[in-house]
Amino acid sequence: MENITDYFTYRPYALTDYSQLKALMETAYADLENPAMSQEEMELLQSIYPEGQILCFDGQRLIAASLNRIVATDKYVSNFTEEQTFDMSVYKSDAQANESVYALDFVVLPEYQSQRVGFQLRQVLHHQIFNVDNFIALVGVSRLSNYYQYQNEMDCETYVQKVKNRELRDPVLSFHLAHKMETRSILPNFNPNDKKSAGFGLSVILKNPYYNPLLPTYEKKTVSF
């Protein structure tokens, strides 16, 4: 997979990309503690689902990334934390389900967020997991990155509903909603270090509109589980 969309190039992660990926995540998530994936984690993700680790470049500069793993569709819907989703000890066992893709991270450099890089990267991801690999759904957790401004005025449920009604805008949740992701469960204490989200997360899902149960799901497994 190598796509060139407008002026940006998209391709799978390679082990030699790690230093750039680490720098990207540290820049984009400057408000979080320990924001970058470890090199060991990236090696594991690549070994399990190499096509699901997608990078976006502007020339030679890494400007965005989508990092994903394979899971059971309903496992990460409610009552879980970020620490559990990044528990490397379950990556291989979760992948045995071979049903859906969990979005571990979707990151774009701030100065490129107004250039539709996120939109284009999401389209590349959707094509890979839906059209090519025939997964049932894309699941994940949205930050609520403006909630800290309203946490003393309203509860999290009200905030989410106001964003869904377009009465308020949340950069992350609004992005997911624009891509037709459905909201599932509000997750209190999902990430206590995420001060902008006041520790909350919101589980989201996008079902594959092209899913064909008569066809195999992700035939290109490279690891024997």
Image (cartoon, grey):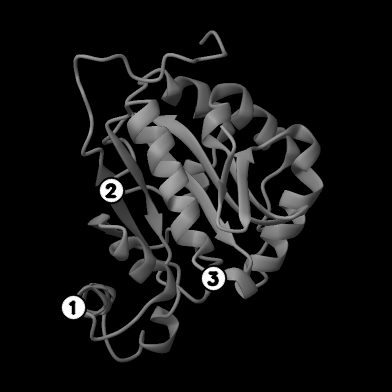
Residue at x-position 29% and y-position 64%: 177
Please state the total of marks drawn on the protein image.
Answer: 3
Q: Which residue is mark 3?
A: 115
Q: Is residue 143 above or below residue 104?
A: below
- The residue lying toward the viewer, choosing from 156 and 60, is 60
Marks 2/1: CA distance? Answer: 18 Å
Which corner quadrant of the image does residue 203 belong to? bottom left
Mark 1 residue crowding within 10 angstroms, few (<14) / some (14–19) / many (20+): few
Mark 2 residue crowding within 10 angstroms, few (<14) / some (14–19) / many (20+): many
- The residue lying toward the viewer, choosing from 161 and 2, is 2
In the image as oriented, which residue stretches furthest toward the front? 6
| Residue type at tag 3 | Gln
Q: Earlier in the sequence, mark 2 or mark 1?
A: 1
Q: Which residue is mark 1?
A: 165
In the image as oriented, which residue stretches furthest toward the bottom? 153
Q: Is residue 172 left or right of residue 54?
A: left
Say which quadrant the N terminus sits in. Answer: top right
Marks 2/3: CA distance? Answer: 25 Å
Residue at x-position 50% and y-position 15%: 221
Residue 47 in percent (x, y) is at 62, 22
Which corner quadrant of the image does residue 182 belong to? bottom left
Which numbered marker is on residue 139?
Answer: none
Q: Earlier in the sequence, mark 2 or mark 3?
A: 3
Residue 218 in percent (x, y) is at 40, 20
Q: Is residue 56 left or right of residue 132?
A: right
| Residue type at tag 2 | Ile
Which numbered marker is on residue 205?
Answer: 2
